[in-house]
Image: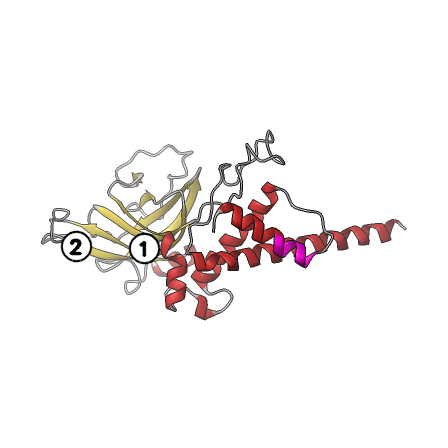
Amino acid sequence: MTAQEFREEFNLRYNNALEGAPGLDTFEISSYLTIAQEQYVKMHYDGSKDVSTAFEYTEKCRRVLSPLVRNKILDTPMTNVLTSNIPSDSPLNGGMTEFSSFWDISDDLMYIVSEHVATGGTREVENGPLIGYNITPVIPITHDEFHLSYKNPFRKPSKRKVWRMDSFVQGSKVVVELIPSINFGFIQEYRVRFIARPRPIIVESFESADDTAGLDLTIEGRSAMATCRLNEFTHREIINIAVQNAVLDYRESNLQGRVQLDSRV
Protein backbone atom coordinates (compact mmCIF):
# COMPACT_ATOMS: atom_id res chain seq x y z
CA MET A 1 0.00 0.00 0.00
CA THR A 2 1.05 3.57 -0.58
CA ALA A 3 0.96 6.06 2.28
CA GLN A 4 -2.19 7.59 0.80
CA GLU A 5 -3.87 4.18 0.62
CA PHE A 6 -3.04 3.61 4.28
CA ARG A 7 -4.76 6.89 5.12
CA GLU A 8 -7.85 6.22 3.01
CA GLU A 9 -8.42 2.72 4.37
CA PHE A 10 -7.81 3.84 7.96
CA ASN A 11 -10.39 6.62 7.58
CA LEU A 12 -12.91 4.27 5.96
CA ARG A 13 -12.72 1.73 8.78
CA TYR A 14 -12.56 4.36 11.51
CA ASN A 15 -15.63 6.19 10.21
CA ASN A 16 -17.55 2.92 9.84
CA ALA A 17 -16.72 1.98 13.43
CA LEU A 18 -17.54 5.39 14.90
CA GLU A 19 -20.27 7.10 12.96
CA GLY A 20 -20.27 10.82 13.71
CA ALA A 21 -16.93 10.79 15.54
CA PRO A 22 -14.54 13.70 14.88
CA GLY A 23 -11.95 13.01 12.21
CA LEU A 24 -8.27 12.54 12.97
CA ASP A 25 -5.52 14.71 11.53
CA THR A 26 -2.42 13.58 9.62
CA PHE A 27 -0.25 13.35 12.73
CA GLU A 28 -2.83 11.36 14.71
CA ILE A 29 -3.43 8.85 11.91
CA SER A 30 0.31 8.42 11.39
CA SER A 31 0.84 7.92 15.12
CA TYR A 32 -1.85 5.24 15.36
CA LEU A 33 -0.45 3.40 12.33
CA THR A 34 3.12 3.57 13.65
CA ILE A 35 2.11 2.27 17.08
CA ALA A 36 0.03 -0.50 15.50
CA GLN A 37 2.96 -1.52 13.30
CA GLU A 38 5.22 -1.86 16.35
CA GLN A 39 2.56 -3.86 18.21
CA TYR A 40 2.23 -6.13 15.19
CA VAL A 41 6.00 -6.72 15.06
CA LYS A 42 6.16 -7.49 18.80
CA MET A 43 3.24 -9.87 18.54
CA HIS A 44 4.89 -11.82 15.72
CA TYR A 45 8.27 -11.93 17.39
CA ASP A 46 7.39 -13.14 20.87
CA GLY A 47 4.02 -14.78 20.22
CA SER A 48 2.34 -12.56 22.82
CA LYS A 49 -1.04 -13.12 21.20
CA ASP A 50 -0.54 -16.80 20.34
CA VAL A 51 2.60 -18.95 20.38
CA SER A 52 1.89 -19.88 16.77
CA THR A 53 2.55 -16.25 15.83
CA ALA A 54 6.12 -16.25 17.22
CA PHE A 55 9.07 -15.57 14.92
CA GLU A 56 10.17 -18.69 12.97
CA TYR A 57 7.21 -20.74 14.28
CA THR A 58 5.52 -20.70 10.87
CA GLU A 59 6.39 -19.57 7.37
CA LYS A 60 3.99 -16.63 7.68
CA CYS A 61 5.70 -15.39 10.85
CA ARG A 62 9.11 -15.53 9.20
CA ARG A 63 7.78 -13.58 6.22
CA VAL A 64 6.22 -10.94 8.48
CA LEU A 65 9.56 -10.01 10.03
CA SER A 66 12.01 -10.92 7.25
CA PRO A 67 12.17 -7.32 5.89
CA LEU A 68 13.41 -6.21 9.32
CA VAL A 69 16.20 -8.78 9.77
CA ARG A 70 19.64 -7.15 9.83
CA ASN A 71 23.19 -8.48 10.20
CA LYS A 72 25.98 -6.51 11.79
CA ILE A 73 29.66 -7.29 12.30
CA LEU A 74 31.42 -5.24 14.97
CA ASP A 75 35.20 -5.38 15.29
CA THR A 76 35.82 -2.53 17.72
CA PRO A 77 34.22 -2.29 21.17
CA MET A 78 33.23 1.05 22.63
CA THR A 79 35.64 0.20 25.44
CA ASN A 80 37.38 -2.73 27.05
CA VAL A 81 37.24 -2.51 30.84
CA LEU A 82 40.61 -4.22 31.30
CA THR A 83 42.56 -1.88 29.02
CA SER A 84 40.68 1.43 29.16
CA ASN A 85 40.80 4.40 31.48
CA ILE A 86 37.10 5.15 31.87
CA PRO A 87 35.91 8.41 33.50
CA SER A 88 34.16 7.78 36.81
CA ASP A 89 30.97 9.46 35.61
CA SER A 90 30.74 7.43 32.38
CA PRO A 91 27.98 4.79 32.05
CA LEU A 92 30.75 2.54 30.71
CA ASN A 93 32.44 2.63 34.09
CA GLY A 94 31.77 -0.37 36.30
CA GLY A 95 31.62 -3.42 34.06
CA MET A 96 30.44 -6.59 35.78
CA THR A 97 33.98 -8.05 35.44
CA GLU A 98 37.41 -6.70 34.57
CA PHE A 99 37.24 -8.69 31.32
CA SER A 100 33.97 -7.09 30.16
CA SER A 101 33.70 -5.05 26.98
CA PHE A 102 30.91 -2.74 25.81
CA TRP A 103 29.51 -2.79 22.27
CA ASP A 104 27.18 -0.43 20.45
CA ILE A 105 24.93 -2.69 18.38
CA SER A 106 22.58 -0.38 16.49
CA ASP A 107 20.30 2.58 16.98
CA ASP A 108 17.37 0.69 15.44
CA LEU A 109 17.73 -2.57 17.39
CA MET A 110 14.47 -4.13 18.53
CA TYR A 111 15.27 -7.83 19.18
CA ILE A 112 18.46 -9.88 18.91
CA VAL A 113 17.85 -13.11 17.00
CA SER A 114 21.30 -14.72 17.18
CA GLU A 115 24.82 -13.67 18.13
CA HIS A 116 28.36 -14.97 18.44
CA VAL A 117 31.91 -13.72 18.85
CA ALA A 118 35.12 -14.61 17.05
CA THR A 119 38.62 -14.87 18.48
CA GLY A 120 42.06 -15.69 17.10
CA GLY A 121 43.23 -16.30 13.56
CA THR A 122 42.90 -14.12 10.50
CA ARG A 123 39.37 -12.89 9.94
CA GLU A 124 38.33 -14.76 6.79
CA VAL A 125 39.08 -15.69 3.22
CA GLU A 126 36.93 -15.85 0.10
CA ASN A 127 35.46 -19.27 0.90
CA GLY A 128 35.00 -18.85 4.66
CA PRO A 129 36.88 -18.52 7.95
CA LEU A 130 40.55 -19.39 8.19
CA ILE A 131 42.01 -22.01 10.52
CA GLY A 132 42.31 -20.59 14.01
CA TYR A 133 39.27 -18.37 13.64
CA ASN A 134 37.15 -19.57 16.57
CA ILE A 135 33.41 -18.97 16.77
CA THR A 136 31.75 -18.90 20.20
CA PRO A 137 28.02 -18.42 20.89
CA VAL A 138 26.83 -15.50 22.98
CA ILE A 139 24.23 -16.24 25.65
CA PRO A 140 21.96 -13.45 27.00
CA ILE A 141 21.58 -13.36 30.79
CA THR A 142 19.95 -11.11 33.37
CA HIS A 143 21.68 -9.37 36.28
CA ASP A 144 20.13 -11.90 38.68
CA GLU A 145 21.47 -14.78 36.61
CA PHE A 146 24.92 -13.22 36.61
CA HIS A 147 25.08 -13.03 40.40
CA LEU A 148 23.77 -16.59 40.78
CA SER A 149 26.06 -18.16 38.20
CA TYR A 150 29.33 -16.24 37.89
CA LYS A 151 31.14 -18.23 40.59
CA ASN A 152 29.56 -21.52 39.58
CA PRO A 153 32.22 -23.44 37.60
CA PHE A 154 29.56 -25.30 35.61
CA ARG A 155 27.52 -22.24 34.63
CA LYS A 156 29.93 -19.32 34.34
CA PRO A 157 31.43 -18.15 31.01
CA SER A 158 33.88 -20.54 29.38
CA LYS A 159 35.69 -21.11 26.10
CA ARG A 160 32.37 -22.41 24.80
CA LYS A 161 30.18 -19.43 25.68
CA VAL A 162 30.25 -15.70 26.31
CA TRP A 163 27.60 -13.91 28.31
CA ARG A 164 25.77 -10.80 27.11
CA MET A 165 23.94 -8.37 29.38
CA ASP A 166 21.87 -5.41 28.27
CA SER A 167 23.77 -2.44 29.63
CA PHE A 168 22.21 0.93 28.81
CA VAL A 169 20.94 3.23 26.09
CA GLN A 170 23.20 6.17 25.25
CA GLY A 171 21.29 8.60 23.07
CA SER A 172 20.05 6.41 20.23
CA LYS A 173 22.68 3.73 20.84
CA VAL A 174 21.81 0.35 22.34
CA VAL A 175 24.88 -0.76 24.31
CA VAL A 176 25.49 -4.30 25.57
CA GLU A 177 28.17 -5.76 27.82
CA LEU A 178 29.97 -8.94 26.73
CA ILE A 179 31.44 -11.04 29.55
CA PRO A 180 33.96 -13.74 28.57
CA SER A 181 35.85 -16.14 30.80
CA ILE A 182 39.22 -15.19 32.30
CA ASN A 183 41.17 -17.21 29.72
CA PHE A 184 38.94 -16.49 26.75
CA GLY A 185 41.23 -14.08 24.92
CA PHE A 186 40.55 -10.94 22.93
CA ILE A 187 37.21 -10.66 21.12
CA GLN A 188 38.02 -9.79 17.51
CA GLU A 189 34.46 -9.66 16.22
CA TYR A 190 30.95 -9.55 17.60
CA ARG A 191 28.41 -10.72 15.02
CA VAL A 192 24.74 -9.99 15.57
CA ARG A 193 21.57 -10.79 13.67
CA PHE A 194 18.65 -8.72 14.89
CA ILE A 195 15.15 -7.46 14.19
CA ALA A 196 15.29 -3.75 13.43
CA ARG A 197 12.65 -1.32 14.61
CA PRO A 198 10.38 -0.48 11.65
CA ARG A 199 10.41 3.11 10.51
CA PRO A 200 7.26 5.16 11.21
CA ILE A 201 4.30 5.12 8.84
CA ILE A 202 3.64 8.76 7.91
CA VAL A 203 0.70 9.20 5.57
CA GLU A 204 1.70 12.70 4.43
CA SER A 205 4.64 14.96 5.11
CA PHE A 206 3.91 16.95 8.27
CA GLU A 207 5.52 20.04 6.73
CA SER A 208 3.13 20.08 3.78
CA ALA A 209 -0.12 18.62 5.17
CA ASP A 210 -2.79 21.28 5.68
CA ASP A 211 -3.56 20.19 9.24
CA THR A 212 0.05 19.88 10.49
CA ALA A 213 2.10 22.42 8.51
CA GLY A 214 4.09 24.78 10.70
CA LEU A 215 3.64 22.72 13.88
CA ASP A 216 7.15 21.15 13.80
CA LEU A 217 5.80 17.64 14.42
CA THR A 218 7.83 14.42 14.17
CA ILE A 219 7.45 10.71 14.94
CA GLU A 220 10.71 9.17 16.11
CA GLY A 221 12.52 12.13 14.59
CA ARG A 222 10.88 11.77 11.15
CA SER A 223 8.38 14.01 9.43
CA ALA A 224 8.58 13.02 5.72
CA MET A 225 5.95 10.79 4.14
CA ALA A 226 6.82 7.08 4.49
CA THR A 227 4.86 3.90 3.99
CA CYS A 228 5.18 0.49 5.62
CA ARG A 229 8.17 -1.65 4.63
CA LEU A 230 6.71 -4.91 5.86
CA ASN A 231 5.30 -7.40 3.36
CA GLU A 232 2.07 -6.21 1.79
CA PHE A 233 -0.06 -8.97 3.30
CA THR A 234 0.54 -7.37 6.72
CA HIS A 235 -0.78 -3.92 5.82
CA ARG A 236 -4.49 -4.43 6.43
CA GLU A 237 -3.80 -6.25 9.69
CA ILE A 238 -1.79 -3.24 10.86
CA ILE A 239 -4.64 -0.91 9.85
CA ASN A 240 -7.09 -3.07 11.82
CA ILE A 241 -4.97 -2.72 14.96
CA ALA A 242 -4.60 1.03 14.43
CA VAL A 243 -8.35 1.51 14.04
CA GLN A 244 -9.08 -0.63 17.11
CA ASN A 245 -6.68 1.51 19.17
CA ALA A 246 -8.22 4.75 17.88
CA VAL A 247 -11.78 3.56 18.57
CA LEU A 248 -10.81 2.43 22.07
CA ASP A 249 -9.16 5.79 22.84
CA TYR A 250 -12.24 7.67 21.60
CA ARG A 251 -14.65 5.59 23.67
CA GLU A 252 -12.47 5.84 26.80
CA SER A 253 -12.16 9.62 26.46
CA ASN A 254 -15.94 9.91 26.09
CA LEU A 255 -16.45 7.72 29.15
CA GLN A 256 -14.00 9.80 31.22
CA GLY A 257 -15.79 12.96 30.08
CA ARG A 258 -19.15 11.58 31.19
CA VAL A 259 -17.72 10.50 34.56
CA GLN A 260 -16.27 13.99 35.15
CA LEU A 261 -19.60 15.60 34.17
CA ASP A 262 -21.56 13.31 36.49
CA SER A 263 -19.19 14.08 39.38
CA ARG A 264 -19.67 17.83 38.89
CA VAL A 265 -23.45 17.41 38.81
Q: Is residue 34 visible?
A: no
Q: Please indicate whether residue 31 sits to the left or right of residue 109 in the image.
A: right
Q: Main secondary structure of the magenta part?
A: helix
Q: Please indicate whether residue 129 sits to the left or right of residue 75 in the image.
A: left
From the top left corner, tell me how far across and down residue 34 is, in percent.
52, 48
| Foreground disc of the pair 2, 1 | 2
Residue type beneath disc 2: Asn
Q: Nearer the viewer, residue 206 or 148?
A: 206
From the top left corner, tell me how far across and down residue 202 is, in percent.
52, 43
Q: Which residue is mark 2?
A: 134
Q: Which residue is mark 1?
A: 163
Q: Which disc, if any, is residue 7? A: none
From the top left corner, tell me how far across and down residue 112 is, in percent.
36, 54
Q: Secondary structure at mark 1?
A: strand
Q: Which residues are magenta?
A: 12-18
Task: Kindly give the residue lying farthest to the right in the view shown.
Answer: 265
Colouring style? secondary structure
Residue 61 vs 76, above or below: the answer is below
Q: Nearer the viewer, residue 138 or 61?
A: 61
Q: Please indicate whether residue 32 sits to the left or right of residue 125 in the image.
A: right
- The answer to whether residue 15 is magenta is yes
Residue 257 vs 204, above or below: the answer is below
The residue under the point 34% across, 45% down is: 105
The residue under the point 65% across, 45% down is: 24
**Other-residue count near label 1 (Cα within 10 Å), few / some / many at <14 / 14–19 / ≥20:** many
Residue 242 vs 82, above or below: the answer is below
Distance of label 2 from label 1 (alpha carbons): 16 Å
Residue type beneath disc 1: Trp
The residue under the point 38% across, 42% down is: 94
Upstream in sequence: badge 2 or badge 1? 2
